[in-house]
Amino acid sequence: MKTGTICVHGAKNDSSSTGAITVPIYQAATFSHLGPGRSTGYDYSRTQNPTREYLEKTVANLEGGCGALAFSTGMAAETACLELFGSGDHIIASDDLYGGTVRLFDNTAARRGISTDYVDTGSVKNIENAIKPATKAIFIETPTNPMMKVTDIAATAAIAKKHNLLLIVDNTFLTPYFQKPVSLGADIVIHSGTKYLCGHNDTLAGFVVCASSAIEEKLRFIQKTTGACLSPFDSYLLIRGIKTLALRMERHEENARVIAEWLCVQPKVKKVYYPGLPDHPVIKVSKKQSSGFGGMISFRMDSEKNAVAVLERVRLIKFAESLGGVETLITYPLTQTHLDVPKEKREKSGIDECLLRLSVGIEDSDDIIEDLKRAFE
């Protein structure tokens, strides 16, 4: 089936006996047994729940993985992946990541003796040069948050396999509708399900998609042990959100293309970061590995004063810290998503007082532009 059809129909619905089109919310913490050694297949919802299981199978089908695990947040999903590593292990990561990921690596992982080197993973040579005897994984976002850098997933996967490393890809920005890292060689794909997969800014969720049953088995044990699983009701919200993923992603991108081009000719805008612009440094890589460029744009104003003015003057666009919902949101990475990233690292990445990040919604693009025009005055 095509991706858009999988979004609508998901996994096999076990409610055929009732004829229900919607997957039931099994709001149960525990399940009764028929007798000793006679389980229904469900014992306790931390281990598995029918509603969450349906969602996990849907996401696995979308990504082309052998299995998926649904977590309470995107950060819970990333934390579970860290449990695959131990003291003395080394990870290579993209030098432009979501601030929460950097905080996790620089604090939680570091305290456990796991070291991280951040490199520009857009260059294969940078990745090769960063590999050490203790290296166990390569962690990339593509496009990155917020500078929209793009990494060649297939080329990175080839390096990972050559050196027996795990390749972990955060696919939050493009979703499996536009990009499928497993098909390009990734071992693990991570999502903040809060964002585009949910699509309505009404719940938190995270996903880990596994390319092999061996990795899935390890992560299921970790999830069962640490307990950060997604609730039945939140699983239902994600199932409902994913049904319109294809339609939403098409509209997000359609709007983003128009707005990115408009921003490029604004006198107060010094630089626009969008993977679909013709002058993006690696647009050829994006076209090779992705079927779309997504709805995320970052842009640099000509001064801090004008950047702050935009945040204060927008009305239709909401000044908020998230992305991927139907509403257009604008974020100030310096004080929001990347506040905990060390100043030196922020500045090296280009995250300063003039940078704004726009999550383009599905409103009419003319209305979004009109709101930006007023904010720019």
Image (cartoon, rainbow, N blue to C red):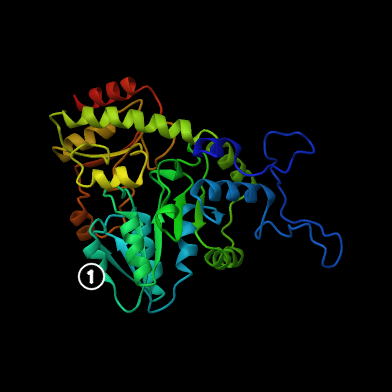
Name the residue nearer the viewer: 26 or 38: 38
Amino acid type at image mark 1: Asn
The location of residue 121, given as percent across then percent down, is 27, 59
The location of residue 193, given as percent across then percent down, is 49, 47
The location of residue 158, given as percent across then percent down, is 34, 63
Q: Circle 1 sits in a helix, a strand or a loop, which is it?
A: helix
- Residue 313, visible in the rendered structure: no
The location of residue 153, given as percent across then percent down, is 34, 55
Q: Quadrant of residue 109?
A: bottom left
Is 4 located above or below residue 77 in the figure?
Answer: above
- Residue 124, visible in the rendered structure: yes
Identified at 56% across, 59% down, the residue is 228
Image quarter in which the C terminus is found: top left
Residue position for label 1: 129
Q: Neighbour class for label 1 at 10 Å: few (<14), some, many (≥20)?
A: few
Identified at 26% across, 26% down, the residue is 372
Q: How many numbered marks does the figure carry?
A: 1
Identified at 74% across, 60% down, the residue is 43
Instruction: State left or right for residue 28 relative to residue 85.
Output: right
Instruction: State left or right for residue 26 relative to residue 267.
Output: right
Identified at 82% across, 60% down, the residue is 33
Instruction: State left or right for residue 35 relative to residue 133.
Output: right
Image quarter in which the N terminus is found: top right
Is 327 located above or below residue 45 in the figure?
Answer: above
Name the residue nearer the viewer: 144 or 58: 58
